Amino acid sequence: MKIPLFKIEWRQEDIDAITKVIERGNYWTQGPEVEEFEDRVKFKVGSKYAVACNSGTSALSLALLSAGIKKGDEVIVPSFTFISTVNSVLFTGAKPVFTDIEEKTYALDIKDIKSKITKKTKAVLLVHYAGVSAHYTHSIKKLCEEKNILLIEDAAAGLGGYCNTGYLGTIGDLGVYSFCQNKPITSGEGGMIVTDNEKYYNKIKLLVSHGQKEQEYVNWGYNFRMSSINAALGLSQFKRLEQIIERRNEIAEIYDTIKYTKSIPQRIFEQYTYWIYPIRIKPEDKEPLTNYLRKNKIFCKTYYPPVHKTRFYSKYKVKLPITEKVYDSLLCLPLYSVMDDDEVSYVIQTVNDYYKEK
């Protein structure tokens, strides 16, 4: 592809950071870089605690487990998300309750949340789709407080983004970020949990590393630790976070000028990370436009196929009309911080050419 869906933004300083860890010959697993990365993130977003993990999926699982989510509990989740959001609920033994989204930001619809709450509901897992803040974040938080339900934010692509109630990931009881290769900043693979709750933090610290506290094993646990090598890369990339976010937002604003499509999710608040740039089109245009872009060496796809329509989760037999409507009419264009203006213009021109030729 002339223009892929994403490119990783890297520099020599990233290579130097990794090389430094390797060349010292020790502490590749739990060196000082891990704690420093945690400190940088929690200071940035203003949380009291942060724990680095080997993936965003591990972080989601630990967030749920630390809060005591278990078999017999129900967790409200969107279907319009990466499948790990829902898988993490199953890892605890709890039941995912699929809930529909609203059309402004593709996040959970508070009206449908209210209709799905039962006596078994223990948490709402709120996804900030594409790094764009959920429209009803504040209202959902208030609802969870009233119902004594946990609010956990899947802000996988949202580090550095914020809305009028705070940084994404810090508004609920726990928040999770991902540093997978296609996220705004990456540690190759990795994740992080942030919280202000000391009880949850202490539980996560046990679960992330074999149940070890100091030199004793006092609990069961996983090996979900982030390595020093990954943390060093994350730290190096973190130094450019604001620069990367600024460029991504610039590209999104340029994409807004496409004549024949609708820009969604809507920018309601001040700063988003814009991990991807989704456009809304007529369902009948989705396949031919995809083929046209790919023919012109531009890769595109739709994030995400609804989880409840996958083979494994189809047994839940739920109807989510807005989720399905959005998926049928949505396409994601390439967006990455090292994308230059000529590449952005080429994508825009190609999309416009498709409609002109129809």
Image: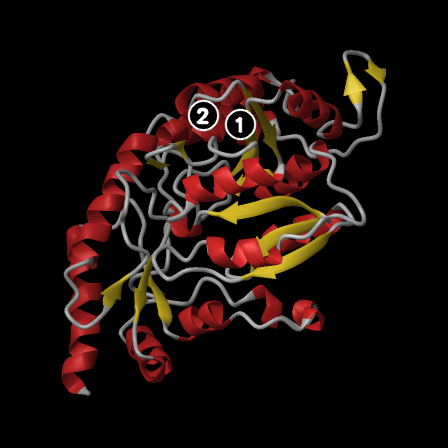
**Is 189 drawn above or below residue 321 in the view shown?**
above
Which residue is located at x 18 percent, y 65 percent?
A: 348
Which quarter shows the N terminus? bottom left
What percent of the width, then of the height, locates residue 21? Answer: 55, 21
Which residue is located at x 29 percent, y 64 percent?
A: 2
What percent of the width, then of the height, locates residue 343? Answer: 20, 58
**Is 253 drawn above or below residue 288 in the view shown?**
above
* Residue on which the image places disc 1: 231
For residue 103, what is the image quadrant?
bottom left
Mark 1 packing: few (<14 Cα in 10 Å), some, or many (20+)?
many
Nearest to the observer: residue 12 or residue 324:
324
Nearest to the observer: residue 264 or residue 339:
264
SS label for mark 1: helix
**Is 121 drawn above or below residue 224 in the view shown?**
below
Which quarter shows the C terminus? bottom left
What percent of the width, then of the height, locates residue 356? Answer: 14, 82
Which mark is on residue 235? 2
